[in-house]
Amino acid sequence: MKFVYGKQDWKTFERGEESCYLMTNGLGGFSSLTVTGSCSRNDHAVLMACVHSPNHRYNMIHRLEEVLHVGNRKVHISSQDNGENNGREEGWLYQTGFTYGDYPQWTYLVDGVEVVKTIALAQGSNTVGISYEIRNFSGKDVKLDVYPHLQFVPKGALLDKGQEFVIEGRRISAGGQSLFVSTDGTFRELPLRFHDSLFYAYDICDGRPETGCTAVNHVVSAEVPARCGKLPLGKTLHMVYGMGAEPDHEPELPSMEEIIRGVEAYRNGLRKQAGFPDGTASVLAAGANQFVSHRESTGKKTILAGFPFFEDWGRDTMIAVSGCCLATGQYGTAKSILQTFMAYCQKGLMPNLFPEGSNAARYNTVDAALLFVLAVYEYYGKTKDGDFVKSAYGTMAEIVEWYEKGTDYGIKMDEDGLITAGSGYDQVTWMDVRVGDILPTPRHGKPVEINAYWYNALRIMEEFAPFGAGDGKDYGRMAERVKESFGAKFWNDGAGCLKDVLSGTEADGQIRCNQIWAVSLPFSVLSPERERQVVEVVFRELYTPYGLRTLSPQDKEFHAFYGGKQLERDLAYHQGTVWVFPLGGYYLAYLKVNGYTEEAKACVRRQLEVMDAALREGCIGQLPEIYDGGNPVSSKGCFAQAWSVGEILRVYDALR
């Protein structure tokens, strides 16, 4: 599927900054600009390289300034807001088209000169290709000047105007990093100048720094003379920028054509492997792989939680792996990811953050380890790889043992068989916001989804017992006790649904989306009638076409809007804000309670149709982290979120 945009989509400069593209390289690096080619965020970049996979990123080429000369006329075809006192580059006025399939293309038209720009990011390396196809119908001499705006700073950092940039042959060096260039245009070094007035409209609305700085030290040009015959004269300008495996290693850069062929072949392979008959699902299957990255510290695969902000987190990975890898047929990748987590299991816990340099791994999550057991179960269901289950069985048994007797962060099985977790300032579930001494959603005690995961983990261990040379009866007895306690203590008769947590506070009775996983998981901890009631209440109170609200609008703590400074954002984050990923649990639960009938599947397919609109807004071909809880119309938070894509892919997988 190719996404096609026209001038109607950038009627104003502001409209043109509403959507962006994303390309990733499998190392943690990426390329992302708006549909008008501007940077509306500090984290936008033509080339965001990753020098130590997957999280040590450098914003190398932030943007491209493009000036077209037609005879004596000079116009910017690039677009960028340079702040109130410095004006804008108004290239969007000359832009006639934008498309995104496997890579983005922009089309411009100025006085009979058509320019088609293409950017492509090489898979597996920090290399970006840029080309400009220039067709001259103007009858005048034409020249295109391209000024790469450089930063060479860690992702999210601000460029210091004291930083030096040095050009030596094909090498550009600054900030301890080197970038090499290959071009068939005219390369000319310029006196270094800094531009410190870039305005980031989509950072200021999130309370982040609103301005940025870039450096320009060279220009690449191409000339197309006036037409002499019947046919227009044309020329294609190619530019390839890449980093070596080592800072001082000069790489052999591929051609633009080689980069494009590689990208197309790679993404076509992903879509073919996934085999979805639905076009939207096929787009998401290719998009899902954009989160998969090499992790240098383990030598295996990992999943980045979201772009442009997040790293690879244990909880997010364990939720995303089923949809992003298993539903798409990427079984080897899923296995590699699970093996990585097995190696880092400690006291029955899976890391929420992997070790980086001198920083130790962090294990502040109660759900990642239980979700690991579920992921192994789903992997086995897809592959029947019994040898892997045997290799993982010891780790899964260790998880259950530590949860039963107690481990860090107050995680332990209570006398009733239920899991309790968290105390003080611990934030161990996915609603893990802390603002100084404020815990908007502490959820200390017995969270509903954690105990649904716990019950399923016990049933899985009961079923997997032969892989560990056991009979599983002890796991079965524990599971029965959990089921009895769960039904007796979590059911809220007055609301006709499940309590969110057992803590002895007012939070227990809040209607939240976490209860949906007690229905959607493979082993039912509730009766069929109660499962149906949960689905109905969640639909009535929390459902939107783009995700589930985290809190009922009827609740006094409900926040309809997410935005502003960090305190304001964090206080709204789980207090009504719509999250996309729980929607997958809702649809799977709906299908389950309706017996996966064709009528139920048709209903879900119809409701999923609006995902086509979501894929066009925000990050093209991706699903975001969140939307406002009141009127969910614009994507917010991370513009591309792994578990959002993964959970919706699980639904498409169930609909095959």
Image (spheres, rainbow, N blue to C red):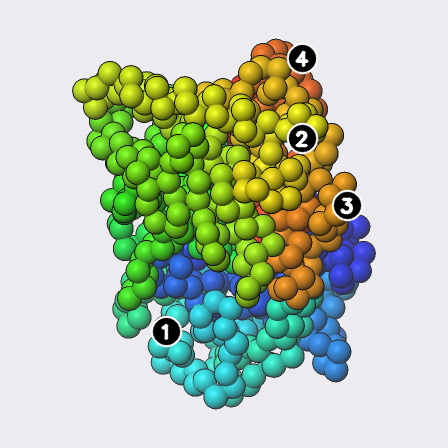
Q: CA distance from mark 1 to mark 2?
A: 51 Å
Which quarter shows the C terminus? top right
Q: Is residue 575 visible?
A: yes
Q: Nearer the viewer, mark 3 or mark 2?
A: 2
Label 4 neighbour load within 10 Å: few <14, some 14-19, many 20+? few
Label 2 neighbour load within 10 Å: few <14, some 14-19, many 20+? many
Determine which residue is flagged by label 4. 599
Determine which residue is flagged by label 2. 538
Q: Which mark is residue 631?
A: 3
Q: Earlier in the sequence, mark 3 or mark 2?
A: 2
Mark 3 residue type: Asn
Q: How far across and how far down the image is residue 374, in percent?
A: 40, 30
Q: Nearer the viewer, mark 1 or mark 4?
A: 4
Q: Which residue is nearer to you in this view: 542 or 442?
A: 442
Q: How far across and how far down the image is residue 489, in percent?
A: 54, 29
Q: Earlier in the sequence, mark 1 or mark 2?
A: 1
Q: How far across and how far down the image is residue 152, in percent?
A: 45, 73
Label 1 neighbour load within 10 Å: few <14, some 14-19, many 20+? some
Locate residue 487 relative to residue 629 in the image: left or right: left
Q: How far across and how far down the image is residue 234, in percent?
A: 60, 58
